[in-house]
Image (cartoon, rainbow, N blue to C red):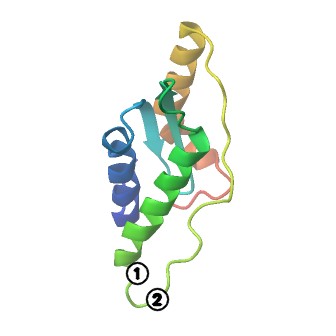
Amino acid sequence: MKLNALGEVAQAQWLGLESRYPQIKCHAHQIMPNHMHGILELHNSVKSELQLSQVIGAYKSLTHKYGRAFFLEKKLAKLWQPNFYEHVIRNDKAFQAITEYIETNPAQWDKDKYFIE
């Protein structure tokens, strides 16, 4: 998948999540033209209870904030849907299968209903 400027912003913000939140680890991810996939691993402690919704909310907000720079002449339209899909990965087999799905997702782009060449 070749990223445009907004895709590069989305990529940079995803890669910056670990430094923003030390209790997470980012695994496989893929920025697509109309959505993204990613695996996040959370390690909460007694002192700090980070919610997945906080991380995703920050990611969406930062991507929108820094993405506006590419739309100076006009307002950047709504970038993200209000919620997200989450799935708990319970074992290594599932982790490997989901990682493979994410990594091969660009090969399925031409089957997406919003596909544009």
- Pick whichever, 30 or 110, lies toward us: 30
- Does residue 95 show up? yes
- Pick whichever, 106 or 45, lies toward us: 45
Q: Is residue 60 left or right of residue 9?
A: right
- Pick whichever, 93 or 17, lies toward us: 17
The residue beneath circle 2 is 74
The residue beneath circle 1 is 71
Tag 1: amino acid: Phe
Tag 2: amino acid: Lys
User: Which class describes the residues within 10 Å of circle 1: few (<14), some (14-19), or many (20+)?
Assistant: few
Q: Is residue 91 left or right of residue 24?
A: right
Q: Could you tell me residue 88's position as x and y percent? A: 65, 24
| Residue at x 68%, y 41% (from the top left corner) | 85
- Mark 1 and mark 2: Cα distance apart in space: 6 Å
- Does residue 2 show up? no
Asked if disc 1 and disc 2 are in contact, CB closer than 8 Å, the reply is: yes
Residue 53: name its quadrant.
Answer: top right
Number of labelled discs?
2
Q: Relative to 90, is 24 above or below?
A: below
| Residue at x 32%, y 46% (from the top left corner) | 16
